[in-house]
Every structure is written in C-alpha cells, then in structure tokens.
Image (tube, rainbow, N blue to C red):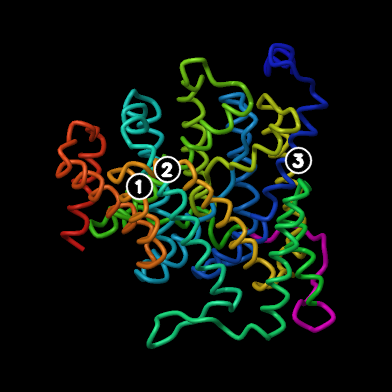
Amino acid sequence: MERFFALNEHGTTARREMAAGVATFLTMAYILIVNPQIMAAAGIDPGAAFVATCLAAAIGSALMGLLANYPIALAPGMGLNAYFAFVVVGSMGVPWQVALGAVFLSGMIFFAISAVRLREWLIGGIPLSLKLGIAAGIGLFLGLIGLKNLGLVVAHPATLVTMGKLTTLPVLLGCAGFILMAALAARRVPGAVIIGILATAAAGIPFGLTQFQGVFAPPPSLAPTFLQMDLAGALQLGLLSVVFTFFLVDLLDNAGTLIATTHRAGLMREDGSVPRLGRALMADSGGAMVGAALGTSTTVSYIESAAGIQQGGRTGLTALTVASFFLLALFLAPLAASVPAFATAPALVFVACLMAQALKSVDWGDETEYLPAMLTVLAMPFTFSIATGIGLGFLAYAGIKTLAGRAGEVHGAVWVLSALCALKFAVS
C-alpha cells in the first residue's frame, strides 16, 4: 500500500486516508437518493438506477484512485442528470436508451482527447468566464428543478412561473429541510445534505407523507438498464448536439474539479499544471462510459471530494475508501426508496446555491467577459436547456470580443466550439 500510493511521500497515513474517504462519502451520499429519483423521471426503473448509481460511483472512484492516485471521488453528476431526464428525455422526447447511448459516446470522445494533447488545447482555450458561467448556469437550472419538485414554483399562463402554495405540509417540510442543510453546512458538519434529506423524510412519517420501507435488503436487479444503451440511435444527426453537450459539460466539470481539488490538496505544480492530468481525465471518461453501460447519466468528479481533502486525504486510497462505501450502499435500497421527492428537492436547491458560487470569480470589470458569462447563466434555466445556454455563451463571447476590437483574445478552441454551436442552432 505504501509503495503503490506513496503515502509517506504525500505526508499521510492509511488511517488518515480512510478517515478522509469516510468524510467524502458522507458529503456526497445524497446522490444515492437523488439520482435514482431523477432517473425515474426519465422512465428508468428506480431500483436499477439505484444499483447503477452505486456501481458507477464505486467503479469511477476506484479508477481515479488506481490510475491517477488522487483523493477524488466520482458519481453521476448533478445538473447533467437533470439535463438527461428533464431536457433530453422529457422535453426532446428522446428514449432513455438513446440518451444513455449519447452519454456513452460523449465518454468515448472524452477518453479519446484525454489520450492526446488536444485536452490541454480545449481546456486551456475556453475562457475562465465561460467556465464559471457554465458552472453557475447549471446550478440555476438545477435550482429551478428543485423548486419545482418542492412545489415552491409552479407554472402560470401569464407570468410563466409563480409561487406555489407555501402552506402545504410537503412544501413546509422541504423548506425546513433546506434550512437544516444550510445550518449544518455552516457548522461544517460532514454529511449535511444527506442528514437534511433523511431528517426531512423522517419528519413526514407521522403525517403519512413518507412510507418507510426498511433499511437493508439485497440489491435490486440491474437487468432493466444494464447494456440497454442505444448507440445507433444516439448517432442520429439531430442528437449530435446532445452528445456535444454531455461531452463539453463533462470536460469542463472534471477539469474545474481537478484544478480546484488538486490545488487545495497541495498537489498542483508551481506553474499551475496538474500532474497526471491525462490519467485523471481518462478515469473520468472511463467512469462516464461505465455509468452509461450500467444505466445512469454522466459520471463526473465531485467537488465534495474537498471534504476528504480537508480531513487530510492526499492519495488514491481516499478514493478507494469512497468506492468501498458505495459498494456497501448497494444493500440500502429500501432506505433510498423510502425518501419522498419533497425531501430530496431541497438538496437540489442547496447544491444549486453551492454551484452559483462560481460567479464570485468572474471578472466583473470587463464587459466582454461577464456579459457572455451572465447570458450563459440566464439562458440555461429560462430556456430550460443547458445546451442552449452553452451555445449562446460561446457565440456571445466571440461576437462581443470581435466587435469590441479584441478578436485576438478569442482562442481557437472558442472559434471551433462557437461554429459548432452556430451549426446546432441553424439545423435545430
């Protein structure tokens, strides 16, 4: 273990790494409850989605630990799962099997560029303002879904949206759950989100709003989703924009998480580069392909890994510990199935608020930077499309920079991605 993970070189111990893994797992365990519910909205069997979530997180985290030796855990990504269920399947009417095929193809593309220098060109070429805008925009998109699921936001024929009935018990319990999560997070309590979800669900039991189904049981069958992805359907011309969106968000999400977590762990080089970046991205892309084969949306690196890093995690042993806990979680399916939507909705809103923090790093003194970023942020929830927000952001960035006489600041990667976005809008 010492030779493989270089524990002494990283100034850590096996006990510290395992404790860090526990902290990371508790911080991101909410995905075990939230993701199956979102996948169920796409028509996927919730039991199979639960197993797929556990296995995708376990395999992805293990790949990161073994290939890159990083204390970073993986699981189906928040925001991308909502895009999968509510936009691709819900709004566009794409069968979930075809959507899984699109996820797999995006993982293949991600894996291919991770093996060559093209990854640095793409990651380095996309301006920081757009990266931050995409992260925050996905957060607002997720927040809108959370508020809708909570019943706090409902449709209105005149104003598009309006406030729901605040006095209903599920809405009140959900709001209380959000406040509890926020308070626990402010107190730096590990697992604030999962504690809030379970407490909210428990509060609904006396009122008949939560049907407790038990805690332990053998894992449900994975057969309804295993290898059900439709690759041929995903290769249709009209779905290439979906594949592109999954790929681009996966790339940006993972690159941002790797940069943030390696910097916090003191693993980043002095020149700002990330060691073993290729291996880490291959672990990410491999996790995405495995997740699609199992039956869940894109698997990504989790920023919640910072919780384990804060506890002293510095090597892949932390990620392997997280993987072990996700495997043990396979036997908690009844508990996950007991949690109602009003208990998970505040978690979506809470995660949305965390993702919106990206806006604080935008250059608010430069109109050519913050205006495209904010257009991206606003377009995602109001068009109910992550892809549209990304496309408008890239086109606005290139156009504003050019007309402002600063076309030289636009990287070649932005021009390529802008052209692809323009083509997507033209044929849609």
Residue named by callout 1: 370
Task: Report the label total.
Answer: 3
Label 3 sits on a secondary structure element that is: helix
Q: State the image quarter where residue 61 is shown.
A: top right
Q: Amino acid at mark 2?
A: Val
10 Å crowding of disc 1: few (<14), some (14-19), many (20+): many
Q: Position of residue 26 (x, y in %)?
A: 74, 47
Q: Could you tell me how far apart the alpha carbons at marks 3 and 1 are, in whole angstroms?
A: 35 Å
Dot placed on the residue nearer the N-terminal end, 3 or 2? 3
Q: State the image quarter where residue 179 is shown.
A: bottom right
Highlighted range, magenta: 205-221
Q: Residue at x 69, y 32 (%)?
A: 309
10 Å crowding of disc 3: few (<14), some (14-19), many (20+): many
List the single residue furthest toward the front.
Answer: 365
Label 1 sits on a secondary structure element that is: helix
Quadrant where the N terminus lies?
top right
Label 2 sits on a secondary structure element that is: loop
Q: Amino acid at mark 3?
A: Ala
Give the overall secondary structure of the magenta segment. loop
Query: Which numbered tag is attached to residue 23?
Result: 3
Q: Could you tell me how far apart the alpha carbons at marks 2 and 1 are, in whole angstroms?
A: 6 Å
